[in-house]
Amino acid sequence: MDIQLKRGILDVCVLRAIKDNESYGYKIIKDVKPYVELSESTLYTILKRLEGAGMLTVRCAEHGGRLRKYYRITKEGIERIEDFKKEWKEVMSIYSFVAKEDTENDQA
């Protein structure tokens, strides 16, 4: 898969994982695992990028004697999810065109 496309998809998956409730790293990985494999190092790179873009905020709180970072989506993050949904319709249309070509060749 194209690295830029995958990067955009992973960003939106992380945003979706925190859309309804703030969350922390391990829980985000657990929440997206049924849909996409995400390593800790990749997740924290994504979280830093999304924070820098203003799509999420971070707060630290003590949990079990250690500081844990909690991530919350911003208005910009929600807008990114909505933009992705619109863009994805176009991607699926293109995919249908490409896959149709394969199906027609298989029937010939």
Image (spheres, rainbow, N blue to C red):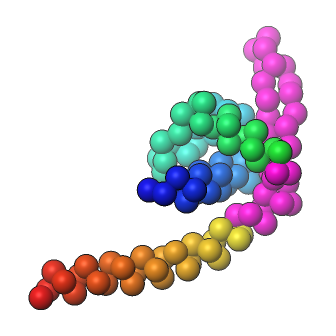
From the viewer's perspective, tell me whether residue 95 is left or right of residue 108.
Answer: right
Dividing the picture into quadrants, the one containing residue 85 is: bottom right
Q: Position of residue 14 (x, y in %)?
A: 65, 48
Q: Can you say which quadrant of the picture contains the N terminus?
A: bottom left
Q: Position of residue 3 (x, y in %)?
A: 52, 52
Q: Position of residue 38 (x, y in %)?
A: 53, 39
Q: Which residues are magenta?
A: 53-81
Against 5, residue 44 (above or below) is: above
Against 45, residue 107 (above or below) is: below
Residue 72 colored magenta? yes
Q: Residue at x 82, y 51 (%)?
A: 53
Residue 35 colored magenta? no
Dividing the picture into quadrants, the one containing residue 46 is: top right
Q: Residue at x 46, y 80 (%)?
A: 94
Q: Position of residue 5 (x, y in %)?
A: 55, 59
From the viewer's perspective, tell me whether residue 22 is left or right of residue 108.
Answer: right
